[in-house]
Amino acid sequence: MRQGQTAGRQETPRRSPATVQAAARTPEKPQKPAAPPAVETRPLSRRTGERPPERVPVILESSGAGDFHLIDSGNALKLEQYGAYRIVRPEAQALWQPELPSHVWEKADSVFTGDTDEDGMGRWRFPKEALGETWPLSLLGVDFLGRFTSFRHVGVFPEQIVHWEWMKTQVEAAKRTKDRPIKVLNLFGYTGVASLVAAAAGAEVTHVDASKKAIGWARENQTLSRLEKAPIRWICEDAMKFILREERRGNHYDIILTDPPKFGRGPNGEVWHLFDHLPLMLDVCRELLSPDALGLVLTAYSIRASFYSIHELMRETMRGAGGVVESGELVIREAGLDGQTPGRALSTSLFSRWVPV
């Protein structure tokens, strides 16, 4: 608000004594809070045919890449290298003791403090010197900005690089064999690193996220990566609403990435609950796959469930489609101070992936 402006100030009309007495005798009814908009929906499809063969459990492991690696973990914390900075963040699954001595941890450039819940808010402490909000990072040849957010995240989930490397390989190979553009749909796309990797490999990308701030950040990353002319559609919308509209339009994609939160809100207040809405989301994604699709990838974070829950859901969703469903966990392996010494594996998320062969 500019100085000198008022926030809709109005004069209060005068009331007679009788009116005041009546108002005092008649308590106002409490106003019910407005219900959030209902999530758009449709009935689930009745799938027939055989469920695809399975590969379980599959452990997709990363020891780091580009400007990232996991240095050490323990005591419900993890020590990571992000470009020039060493960062300490909470990690509930690190039940063991740290491998490295405390003086190494004490040399961190930034430490997240506050709520230890995955989505809880907190703040960053800078033991050495105050740092800027952003700093440059690079993965798979894509440049982007790291950012200290109040939700502990820094703008990229590096364990996802195993999916991004797979996607990059698929897009590059398909470009040589198909006489049409390869289309990628990235749902809950966050800061756009996966979208930029796909675009740099030659795909036409549709990136969907409900946060205007995340879309703005993704556009910054696009400029930083010198991909301003790449064919990327940035869509700020509720993911379910978008894919249901795409289904009605008959649009199709060759690769779909979906990385939903356990809980979230769309730009108009739409409420997302993973266990309530994921079956329909996958069902619609199945309809959006092109006849010669390359894959459907689901990642699930911060949920109390076995990977088998999303694995069997994926197999049911892909009945009659052939191919294979492979599911398990994404893990990051400690790489030490030098980024080369293998240590313990830290589980980060569950995943399920359908591929045609």
Image (tube, grey):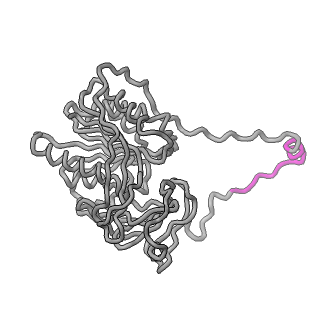
Q: Quadrant of residue 52?
A: top left
The C terminus sits in image quarter: top left
Where in the figure is residue 66, as x and y percent of width and height?
28, 64
Number of numbered markers: 0
Residue 354 lies, with reference to residue 163, above or below; the image says above
- The structure residue drawn at horizontal position 50% and vertical position 77%, both measured from the top left corner, is 127
Q: Quadrant of residue 238?
A: top left
Foreground pick, 118 / 209: 118
**Is residue 310 shown to the viewer in this render?**
yes
Foreground pick, 74 / 1: 74
Where in the figure is residue 322, as x and y percent of width and height?
24, 27
- The structure residue drawn at horizontal position 41% and vertical position 35%, both measured from the top left corner, is 308
Where in the figure is residue 285, as x and y percent of width and height?
33, 34
Where in the figure is residue 259, as x and y percent of width and height?
39, 45
11 falls in the magenta region: yes
Q: Which residues are magenta?
A: 10-23
Q: Quadrant of residue 310?
A: top left
